[in-house]
Amino acid sequence: MSGSRSKARKRAVDFLYEADLRETDAVTLMSDRIGAPETAPVPDYTITLVEGVNENRERIDELLTQHIEGWTLSRMPVVDRAVLRLGLYELLWCPKGDVPPVVAVDEAVELARALSTDDSPRFVNGVLGRLAGIRDRLRKTLPKEGTPVE
């Protein structure tokens, strides 16, 4: 995995984290920053990730709620929530083969290790590992591209 994708993921987590803290839309926040003189250029993959998490956030949160043990989404650290949302988006919504499940999980664990508590990498690994194990079944429940979400 190239360093540029890892950096794009970190940037996406930054936007998701800040939007969650401010209780605002992540895409709007990111759009407001793109092109601002004080903002470094935003990689295309960051945009893809933020838009994807934002677009699928309801289903992502539903799946996380069903598979986290001992926590609720609202009680976990905000950064862990952002990392899990990003990791689950990559696991389920990225085109098949673009991001192998092991890479999606490993990258999320590394983000948790760099940005959160000592317990977070193990927690993120456990949640995303369980979801990766049923990935194919979960993908079948997702709406097809171009299908309106109810």
Image (spheres, rainbow, N blue to C red):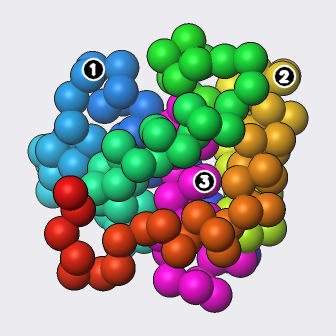
Query: Does the rendering let one see residue 139?
Result: yes
How far apart are the alpha carbons under marks 3 and 2?
Answer: 18 Å
Residue 87 on the magenta span: yes
The residue that appears at 55% across and 71% down in the rendered structure is: 139
CB under 8 Å between discs 3 and 2: no
With 91 as the anchor, is 127 left or right in this view?
right
Q: Amino acid at mark 2?
A: Asp
Disc 3: which residue:
87
Residue 120: image quadrant is top right
Q: Is residue 38 above or below residue 132?
A: above
- Name the secondary structure under disc 3: helix
Residue at the bottom extreme of this rendering: 97
Q: Amino acid at mark 1?
A: Arg
Q: Which residues are magenta?
A: 81-100
Task: Choose mark 1 or mark 3, whichever is in front.
Answer: 3
Q: Earlier in the sequence, mark 3 or mark 2?
A: 3
Task: Choose mark 3 or mark 2, whichever is in front.
Answer: 3
Disc 2: which residue:
118
Q: Camera-side residue: 69 or 43?
A: 69
